[in-house]
Image (cartoon, helix red, strand yellow):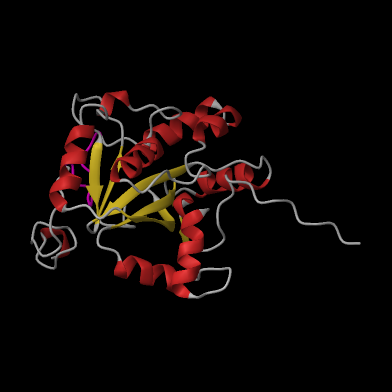
Amino acid sequence: MAAKPAPKKSMDAPKKQLSLGPAYDKTGWEAVVETFGCGTTVSEDDIKEMVKEAKTPVTLHVYAVGHAKAIQEINYVVENFLNEGGVFHGAIEVYGQEFSFGGCRQNKSGIFACKPKSCPMHTYRESIYLGDCKKTIKEVQSILDSMKPEWMGPTYNLLRKNCCSFSNAFAQKLGVGEIPNWVHHLADVGAALDDDVKAVVHGLHSIEDSVEGVFHHQTVHDPDDPAHPGHPEHPSNK
């Protein structure tokens, strides 16, 4: 008799580029299945339709840290042999802008913005739709403003206060629940990394210097506003 497959751990990464967040693991899941009439699974096309129909969709974008092959190989070992989440960069997209957190020596907010899936410091991997927060631009802006004092650049800590910690806190304040455990499992994974690797990963999350494609402001723009990074008339698109 064939052995049953091992149960999926909450820290395991999904095997597709677009999936649903933890809020849909229980009661939300049944609601999605009922709404889309898709049996026991929800396809990526179903999720895209959910995003399209949402008033204010909130999506977590997950990146492999940096662009170096060596860092990617660390994730392969951590995920497949240590059975833990990997070393990731996380960012929250809302109103077509992606917000995350990085470290710096200057006494300023470490929250920064960029185009969704386009953080120049890391390698895009996949997205997780967290839900519809139903908030206005003004409400989202108010949440970001309230977070600035707590998320100052000098307070960045690779294992305890990082980009994934920020994404988790921001998602909860938006009202769409937590991000998946496998994304912000670095505090546990860190024990398996040596000091040299930690130093490299920490450096890759620095926003000390100006990086093309990264905006050191925390303003939520209407998508029709030329100041929105996704607008055709935005300077970055010319």
Instruction: Look at 14% across and 58% down and name the residue there.
Output: 228
Q: In the image, 206: left or right of 97? A: right
Q: Quadrant of the C terminus?
A: bottom left
Residue 133 as seen in the image, left or right of residue 229: right
The secondary structure making up most of the magenta span is loop
Q: Can residue 121 be seen in this view?
A: no
Residue 106 magenta: no
Which residue is pictured at 11% across the width and 61% down the height?
A: 234
- Give how far across and how far down residue 95 sits, in percent: 22, 57
The answer to whether 136 is drawn above or below residue 71 in the figure is: below
Q: Nearer the viewer, residue 122 or 84?
A: 84
Q: Quadrant of residue 117?
A: bottom left
Q: Is there any visible trace of residue 91 in the rendered image?
A: yes
The magenta span reads 208-217
Residue 72, position as x, y percentages in the image: 53, 48
Q: Is residue 213 magenta?
A: yes
In the image, residue 53 sits, relative to residue 138, either above or below, namely below
Q: In which quarter of the image is the N terminus?
A: bottom right
Placement of 25 over or under 203, stated as above or below = below
Q: In this view, does 59 lie to the left or right of 235?
A: right
Residue 32 in percent (x, y) is at 46, 65
* Residue most extreme to the right: 1
**Along the line of sight, the residue nearer the viewer: 226 or 3:** 3
Q: Tell me where residue 62 appears, x and y as whole percent.
A: 42, 51
Q: In this view, does 45 lie above or below 17?
A: below
Numbered circles on residues, count = 0
